[in-house]
Image: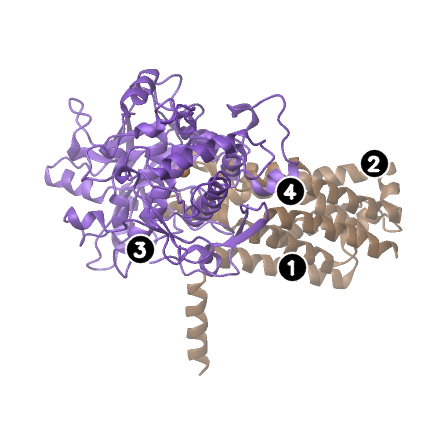
């Protein structure tokens, strides 16, 4: 019985396409880690964002923040990477698919970690830290994110997220192409998603709001009527501000 | 003009109409009236063309007094054309349907018949030696009564000489490579895989599917006719300004009906996102100016009140050519990359040859993955082609000898490059990814093998431009790749 169930399960898994599986699964693991961390103490990034009585950037806290940032990016962004990962995989020779995907993810991850480091550096400025401790800042950030959501610059970055590129088939040039594609895709993703992420993180504590945001970002791409999906997210930000102030 | 039966109007073959038949006369009068209306008016000629695409700096009819609709209105209703997508056919069917309704309302307002329907231009008609010519009603300077002819008021022709020749004789240089109906042999409506042709109707697009690969019908004859007529027809944002555009697209729409009628294996997609009421929907305006929102599943039957038309002739042209039994089945498995060019390839106004290095490891892996007895298909991919300027068609040849670069036995297919500049712009929905074409070259490769002209390590691909007198740099092909299945 157990064997048959296991067989049926594995057959089912195989019928889901592998790229979807291997992006959803690690994303789920990252969410689980984030949940586990948030059970022990308030999430480090939020602690750093909100200032308060936690020392801002103790060495161990910096490492914890980097780890938290990495998990957050993996949890939220991996499910959005199905199309570019498929492209990198199927536009590469079968024998170097794994390597091609790894190159893409390395470039993509580097772009996000670079952005994360930039934010942390910004937060080290004492005035900024003090400003973030003011509760109204979170609401202001949400309103700013709603404005960004409707801007033509974000729309342009979103189009860049749908870009495909020609990859050199082999050699160092192939690795470089995959990495470069990862970086440029990451840059577009950061432009599209980061303002919303930061606003939600600074205004709404806990993992649940981040999960809701991840779902919204996922369905924004899944829903084909982009002219409705985009303002819907902006509206959600404004609603959150109203809810916070009442 | 044929009468309507139970409210279902007949879209007639334009070449079977008498000179200045009522259908064309009323079309001309309605177009003239629509040209008078301001671009803000959804029943105007310019608004109708802008639904397809609009670029202010490319608008040949732009006037200082123009007042455009608001940005949010334009975002929702303009620049909506679906290309490189499985929505290509249903979207254009809706587009033509509402256009026809609007033209008819003008015809009726002018005192004409309410069973007016769009004629179609069957340039592939083997039984008509004039099929590839543009009829005189679209070239004459004036109507029979001497008033100016709005149907002739369009820029056409790949070159100045073709433009002049076309205006005089109707011959704009369309040849049999432009009107080829090989697309009717393709069995699946859509595919969503890398490396394989995207099917008759175009690739599955939307979330988790990247678009871009041009469907077989959309490539030839659709794209090739756009590019051959050229001028306004040669670019997304001006195509709808040429009255011929609508006859061309009526024929493309008719070929969808022809394809469906070829046999039970020729089927529309059944995916919910295409063929269900919950699928992607599209916004238009009807003849009263009211917003009309519809999905692909609503246009499968053209005789419902929404569309209420049928075609004069949807018989299978391949049956008479003895090709009725032939079909190209693409299977469902993925294809694997077995070779690719190492560098980008810049095309020019003279023939360009590029090399595709075939990878021995990839070939071995592909053979291992191939099920026993499964026929192998071979696909040539031209990926991420980008370029600016006027679109121009290229013929592709494989392993063609230097002394005979254009031999029929080495011919692989035609790349019309329609929409090249549009797909290369950063503001294109795919961020300027360019065009990707896939040609099934299985037969061409088999011919090469028979003649011992096949090389296991290298494939030579030659691009020959159809029009030699083009200006500026040609398009750049991001990569040429070879896929086996
Ligand atoms: Cu078209």
Question: Do the residues at pointers 4 and 3 share their chain?
Answer: no
Looking at the rendered image, the disc whose residue lies closer to the viewer, 4 or 2, is 4
Q: How far apart are labels 1 and 3 at the CA level?
A: 47 Å
Observer able to see residue A63: no
The residue that disc 1 covers is A31
The residue that disc 4 covers is A192
Label 2: few (<14), some (14–19) or many (≥20) C-alpha neighbours in 10 Å? few
Q: Which chain is brown?
A: A
Counting from the top left corner in percent of width and height, residue B273 is at 48, 57
Quarter of the figure with residue B145: top left
Looking at the rendered image, the disc whose residue lies closer to the viewer, 2 or 3, is 3
Counting from the top left corner in percent of width and height, residue B114 is at 44, 47
Q: Secondary structure at mark 4?
A: helix
B205 left or right of B161 in image? right
Instruction: Please give the chain letter of the residue carrying mark 2.
Output: A
Looking at the rendered image, the disc whose residue lies closer to the viewer, 1 or 3, is 3
> In this orientation, which residue lies closer to the viewer: A57 or B226?
B226
The residue that disc 3 covers is B260
Q: Which chain is purple?
A: B
Instruction: Please give the chain letter of the residue carrying mark 4.
Output: A
Q: Quadrant of ligand 1?
A: top left
Label 4: few (<14), some (14–19) or many (≥20) C-alpha neighbours in 10 Å? many
The residue that disc 2 covers is A125
């Amino acid at each position: 019985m157990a064997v048959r169930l296991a067989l049926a399960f594995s057959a089912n898994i195989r019928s889901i396409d592998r790229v979807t599986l291997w992006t959803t699964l690690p994303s789920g693991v990252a969410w689980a880690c984030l949940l586990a961390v948030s059970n022990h103490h308030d999430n480090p990034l939020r602690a750093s964002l909100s200032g308060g009585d936690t020392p801002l950037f103790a060495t161990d806290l910096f490492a914890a923040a980097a780890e938290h940032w990495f998990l957050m990016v993996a949890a939220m962004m991996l499910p959005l990477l199905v199309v570019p990962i498929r492209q990198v995989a199927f536009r590469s020779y079968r024998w170097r698919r794994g390597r091609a995907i790894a190159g893409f993810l390395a470039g993509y991850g580097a772009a996000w970690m670079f952005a994360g480091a930039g934010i942390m550096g910004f937060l080290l400025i004492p005035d900024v830290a003090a400003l973030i401790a003011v509760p109204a800042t979170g609401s202001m950030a949400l309103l700013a994110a709603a404005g960004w959501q409707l801007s033509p610059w974000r729309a342009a970055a979103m189009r860049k997220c749908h870009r495909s590129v020609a990859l050199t088939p082999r050699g160092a040039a192939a690795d470089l192409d995959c990495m470069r594609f990862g970086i440029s895709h990451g840059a577009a993703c950061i432009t599209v998603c980061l303002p919303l992420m930061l606003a939600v993180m600074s205004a709404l504590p806990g993992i649940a709001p981040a999960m809701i945001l991840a779902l919204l970002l996922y369905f924004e791409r899944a829903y084909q009527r982009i002219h409705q999906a985009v303002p819907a997210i902006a509206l959600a930000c404004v609603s959150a501000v109203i809810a916070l102030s009442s | 003009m044929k009468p309507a039966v139970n409210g279902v109007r007949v879209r007639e073959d334009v070449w079977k109409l008498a000179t200045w038949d009522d259908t064309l006369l009323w079309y001309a009068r309605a177009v003239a009236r629509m040209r008078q209306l301001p671009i803000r008016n959804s029943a105007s000629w310019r608004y109708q063309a802008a639904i397809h695409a609009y670029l202010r700096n490319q608008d040949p009819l732009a006037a200082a007094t123009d007042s455009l609709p608001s940005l949010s209105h334009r975002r929702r209703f303009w620049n909506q054309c679906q290309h490189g997508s499985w929505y290509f056919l249903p979207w254009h069917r809706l587009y033509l349907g509402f256009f026809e309704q609007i033209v008819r309302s003008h015809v009726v307002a002018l005192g004409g018949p309410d069973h007016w329907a769009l004629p179609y231009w069957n340039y592939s008609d083997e039984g008509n030696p004039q099929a590839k010519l543009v009829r005189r009603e679209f070239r004459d300077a004036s109507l029979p009564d001497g008033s100016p002819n709005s149907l002739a008021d369009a820029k056409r022709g790949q070159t100045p000489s073709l433009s002049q020749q076309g205006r005089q004789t109707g011959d704009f240089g369309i040849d049999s490579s432009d009107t080829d109906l090989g697309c009717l042999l393709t069995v699946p409506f859509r595919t969503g895989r890398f490396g394989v042709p995207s099917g008759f109707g175009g690739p599955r697009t939307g979330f988790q599917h990247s678009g871009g690969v041009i469907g077989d019908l959309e490539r030839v004859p659709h794209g090739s006719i756009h590019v051959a007529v050229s001028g306004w027809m040669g670019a997304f944002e001006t195509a709808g300004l040429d009255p011929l555009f609508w006859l061309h697209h009526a024929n493309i729409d008719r070929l969808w009906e022809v394809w469906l009628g070829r046999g039970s294996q020729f089927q529309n997609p059944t995916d919910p996102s295409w063929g269900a009421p919950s699928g992607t929907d599209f916004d238009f305006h009807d003849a009263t100016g009211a917003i009309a929102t519809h999905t692909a599943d609503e246009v499968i039957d053209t005789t419902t009140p929404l569309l209420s038309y049928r075609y004069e002739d949807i018989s299978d042209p391949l049956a008479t050519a003895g090709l009725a039994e032939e079909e190209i089945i693409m299977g469902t498995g993925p294809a694997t990359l077995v070779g690719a060019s190492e560098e980008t390839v810049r095309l020019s106004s003279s023939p360009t040859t590029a090399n595709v290095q075939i990878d021995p490891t990839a070939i071995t892996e592909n053979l291992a993955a191939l099920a026993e007895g499964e026929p192998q298909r071979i696909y040539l991919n031209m990926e991420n082609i980008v370029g600016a300027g006027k679109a121009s068609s290229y013929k592709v040849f494989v392993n063609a000898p230097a002394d005979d670069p254009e031999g029929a036995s080495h011919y692989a297919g035609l790349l019309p490059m329609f929409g090249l500049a549009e797909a290369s712009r950063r503001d294109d929905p795919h961020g300027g990814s360019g065009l990707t074409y896939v040609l099934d070259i299985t037969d061409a490769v088999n011919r090469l093998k028979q003649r011992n002209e096949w090389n296991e390590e290298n494939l030579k691909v030659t691009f020959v431009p159809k029009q030699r007198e083009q200006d500026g740099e040609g398009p750049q092909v991001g990569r040429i790749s070879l896929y086996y299945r």
